[in-house]
Image: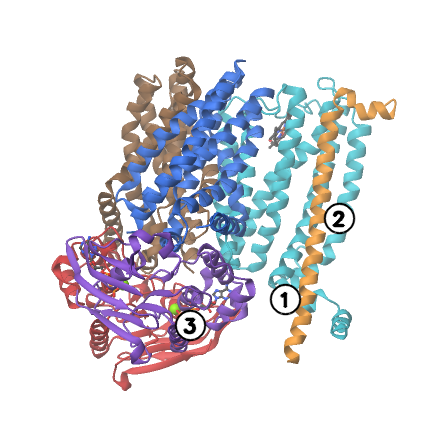
Chain colours: A brown, B blue, C cyan, D purple, E red, F orange
Amino acid sequence: MSRSSMWGAIGGIVRRDLLLAMRRRSDAAMSVFFLVIVVSLFPLGVGPEPAVLRTIGPGVLWVAALLACLLSLARVFTADYVDGTLEQMVLVPQPLAVLVVGKVFAHWVISGLPIVLLSPLLSLQFGLSGESLGVLVMSLLLGTPTLSMIGAIGAALVLGVRGSGLLVALLVLPLYVPVLIFGAGAVTSSMAGIGGEANLSLLGACLVLSLFLAPWATAVALRIALE
Amino acid sequence: MSRSSMWGAIGGIVRRDLLLAMRRRSDAAMSVFFLVIVVSLFPLGVGPEPAVLRTIGPGVLWVAALLACLLSLARVFTADYVDGTLEQMVLVPQPLAVLVVGKVFAHWVISGLPIVLLSPLLSLQFGLSGESLGVLVMSLLLGTPTLSMIGAIGAALVLGVRGSGLLVALLVLPLYVPVLIFGAGAVTSSMAGIGGEANLSLLGACLVLSLFLAPWATAVALRIALE
Amino acid sequence: MSTGINWAKYSSPQALYPLAGRLIPWFSVVAVALMGVGLYMGFFVAPTDFQQGESYRIIFVHVPAAWMSMFLYVVMAIWAGIGLGLNARPSFMMAQAIAPTGAMFTFLALLTGAMWGKPTWGAWWVWDARLTSELILLFQYAGVMLLRTSIDDVRRADRSSAVFALVGVVNVPIIYFSVQWWNTLHQGASVSMSTGSKMAATMLIAMLLMTLAFWMYSIAIILSRVRCIMAERESLPAWEEKPVTIQKIAEAR
Amino acid sequence: MLQAVRLSCRRGERRLFSDLTVKVEPGTLLAIVGENGSGKTSLLRIFSSLLPPEDGAVLWEGEDIQQLKELYSGQLTYIGHLNGIKDDLTPLENLMSAMALAGEVCSQTEAQAALEAIGLKRPIHRLPSKVLSQGQKRRVALARLWLSTRPLWLLDEPFTSLDVASTGIVTERLHAHLQRGGLGVLVTHQEVDLPTDRLQRLRLTG
Amino acid sequence: MLQAVRLSCRRGERRLFSDLTVKVEPGTLLAIVGENGSGKTSLLRIFSSLLPPEDGAVLWEGEDIQQLKELYSGQLTYIGHLNGIKDDLTPLENLMSAMALAGEVCSQTEAQAALEAIGLKRPIHRLPSKVLSQGQKRRVALARLWLSTRPLWLLDEPFTSLDVASTGIVTERLHAHLQRGGLGVLVTHQEVDLPTDRLQRLRLTG
Amino acid sequence: MQWGSASEFFAMGGYGIYVWTSYVVTALCLVWEVLALWRRRVAARAEHRAMLLGGTNETAT
Ligand code: HEM
Ligand SMILES: Nc1ncnc2c1ncn2[C@@H]1O[C@H](COP(=O)(O)OP(=O)(O)OP(=O)(O)O)[C@@H](O)[C@H]1O
Ligand SMILES: Nc1ncnc2c1ncn2[C@@H]1O[C@H](COP(=O)(O)OP(=O)(O)OP(=O)(O)O)[C@@H](O)[C@H]1O
Ligand SMILES: [Mg+2]
Ligand SMILES: [Mg+2]
């Protein structure tokens, strides 16, 4: 098939998903909101000690971002599966992996990007500053698409399986661990004055790896789910 | 209607939901796993410092329990709604609020209780000990049913009102805050040697309150969803 | 042995079933023997560690269990991959059979590690890199098994959990190396065998013997589990029961 | 006796019907017909009390169902577009828990008999419902009719995805119900094979 | 030309059919009939390549569809039990995005014309699909047939919940497709009103 | 041989509780796994015999 029709299919699916998100604008706000809440719950649960908060700040932010990503992703294919759109997607004359990329991208725009954009504001709560703030944004910018890609595999695997909400968490969270370590590590080391470049480039490597492997695995999982 | 038939209806729904859960024995394991994973993510993000971890331990445990509860509950009515069981539930010759209690109870047995039972093990990982461990279990035992009850309102609202995602979060999470504060507070104060009784009795009050109000609110929301 | 095997022949359950049945006793015997020798060496030949005292003797279960836990995951992923690639049911069954044993060794590594940690570090658990990665490994095993039990359709269960096992294996080295950035408490190779002293050598030998024993045990147990799985999934009259038994059953009714 | 008095119904900006008055006597069936989107389902849901009418009232034995609440629910069996069965439970479990929920507890043997009456054979009783075919799922939902002791049946397109044989079986069951003095309201696009003195048609023109 | 060669299909422990060989020539329709649970949907899904057969093969123009993959997908329009429409999008948006996804981009006017052809009037085009009635939703899914340029149509009980008029409209459309040399495979419990030389029946006995 | 007596052996230089818990739990796990498999095998065989009986039944009728 021609290159252009491939982009057409991606474009089509991105457009539709964004349209749907617009129709349900508040759902899109959900992941940001979730992030804000989790991050704000922490000082409530942990106590207001500034020194402690500064230490745990990057970690908490990253864990919260990771959970927000996971939650919004867990259902990324469910609606399509239930209402039959997924069947139609599989029967599209394009490689399924390509459509998966489109779908994940749309999803990231809706729920990952807002997190990235909001993070500087939240990190103020924890007393992050200057350079490490930049590193935080950068790490999220590299990390959240990876999270989306990996999450898509889990979401596809649990389609139509009962109790899938938590199962997907169980499947995906262990795979998120490296991203979390590098992401939070980048911020912590920049706070310690070591600079976060090493961690950031590892995050980049993770992104590239997941871009190559995840759509393929997701496509396989989706086909299996539909049999 | 007679008292006994009321218990019959509750029993019926509890039995069906437990049966459904048994069909997927792993479901019960799932919320536990989720808890364990989320709790383990924090040290990964925050770093391995034992002193810091001990300080944030109760908070982390409580936030994780809260999330596990929220997530598993968020969709507690969705399946019933989609497949039409909810229509049948509303048409049962019993007050809907009663059925709601049954459904939430079954849900708590499947996903809340395991969390309570597992928490001592997890708190060992954070270096909690002796008495505060008991207080933690107690606080979770009182707190998680409250979370379930409150969460049910949100879950019911998700079904009906358009764009309700944000609304639910707005409604439910602020209601969760007191539970979180009392719950984590009980543990922290028992760690500080003050004893957690005051907080625990507040938690008990929350539970009673939610037992009275939440089923009614949930029933109203469910009816609206079906109109 | 290495060249003469006709793989096509053994890729069917009908062939694997009796083959496994013949191999199990051998591996069991070897496992028991190695375990006996290993334990003897570990408890009666290997000397006391001058730093840790007798508590170090946990090493003879801890390290073999930890090694097996990682090794089995990789083997499981390989079978899963073969299954997906060739669409071969026996490979999926092998992957399914490996998971519980792997998870058990992971659990044992964690437990014996905790038992070791209390006297050595004064804590059952620390959030150390290697410990955490072992915990994550346990979750991955749990994921593979729970995903399988959550899916009723056997074909889908096979293939879905295979996909997950494969994806997860990418994670194993990543975790392993990513934790290098962490300052680690775990002993690493601290039971210094580097000096090549006689003491260390007996320890090393005992440890290796135990590892080998666990390995043989795993093979035996996995083969017999795969036989169970086959018996449950397919109807295998001809391979399971001797004709005489079938005759008896027929008469019994 | 079920009566609709000057009912009207509006969905969004559309008025589906207004001033609709109709009476269903014991032993008779009201068949609601009409084009797609003419408001058949909406009317049935008003009858079931799931949807409050914009105007007018539904009376059961002369009393407003809005007042009767659970008492009215105890009189009816409603089977909608959706089957209300759980994918993870077997047909048997689905049927039994649906009956238990409705307060009409039944034994396993009774449930099995009901499933067999509607043509679901033994081995199927023990499969998870999600592997059933469309028509088989519909039959699981309809099997409740063999166990229901309620006087009023509200059925929304019960014959969807059923094969010809099962359609006949369900119609027969319906007939038996009417002969025992039951009432029914039925939405359908197909002809219903019932004696004309038992059948009353209501055409909605949307 | 679509051929099934010695197909067999097993779901769980049940063998639904085996050694099934059938040929669909251009300009003709294969109507699959049979009881509930006899395997009609499964066969259609095998034809669509969604479900791999246990044994045997499906050939399109002589080539195995398992090999053709996306090339084959580009030849067919599949409409299953499920409508594949999004509750939150309007019928118009649903139709247009379904076509765009399938790689047959259409303009808004074309889409509107298609919806009107199947009897959905203007105001409905702009409602969110979730408020539509069952039959109206089905029509939104079927409207794709007015825009499809694919030679092979695979339809699973397209007439479910449709009123009589719409059933006629869809049948006519199907006829036109066959006259233009298209092929169709149809699962249905109803009689299909098509000339006999265009129609081939396959009865599954499950 | 470094153990003077059996009690010394079991005390493990004061670390007995840790060492022996490790070994005992490990042994229990291995034994449990073997037993569980054995039970599973017996069950599978029983099932299979029942099926054989059922099978002959079916052909008879
Ligand atoms: C829960 C706690 C523990 C866990 C999960 C754990 C996990 C592991 C793992 C996964 C390995 C294999 C890794 C490798 O070969 O590089 C290992 C090896 C080892 N562990 Fe542990 N461990 C724990 C506690 C301990 C403690 C407390 C000690 C001693 C004080 C210890 C001493 C060793 C030694 C000496 C090795 C062999 C290392 C080598 O030769 O490479 N472990 N452990
Ligand atoms: N918010 C709304 N705005 C405008 N029209 C609406 C709204 N909600 C529902 N409708 C219309 O109300 C009607 C609902 O009809 P209903 O579901 O009762 O139809 P039906 O007779 O059961 O049709 P079918 O035979 O297709 O099942 C539809 O025509 C629908 O378009
Ligand atoms: N795991 C399984 N075990 C046993 N039987 C199964 C399994 N999965 C599916 N089946 C059976 O396979 C058949 C699937 O049939 P299919 O959906 O193709 O039927 P259909 O002809 O389309 O029926 P309908 O007219 O009801 O739509 C059903 O009889 C179902 O019970
Ligand atoms: Mg309707
Ligand atoms: Mg079908």
Horizontal and vertical percent position of residue B49: 51, 18
Residue at mark 3 shares a chain with residue at mark 1 = no
Q: Residues within 10 Å of mark 2 (few under 14, many from 20)?
A: some
Location of mark 1 (residue): C235
- Secondary structure under tag 2 reads helix
Give the image quarter of residue F11: top right
Horizontal and vertical percent position of residue A135: 33, 24
Q: Residues within 10 Å of mark 3 (few under 14, many from 20)?
A: many
Residue E141 visible in the shown view: no
Q: Amino acid at mark 1?
A: Ser
Q: Is residue E196 left or right of residue E10?
A: left
Q: Amino acid at mark 2?
A: Ser
Horizontal and vertical percent position of residue B107: 47, 43
Q: Residue at x 34, y 59 (%)?
A: A87
Q: Amino acid at mark 3?
A: Asn
Question: Which of the chains bears the disc numbered 1?
Answer: C
Q: Is residue B201 left or right of residue D49?
A: right
Q: Residues within 10 Å of mark 1 (few under 14, many from 20)?
A: some
Location of mark 3 (residue): E36
Q: Is label 3 in contact with label 1 (beta carbons under 8 Å)?
A: no
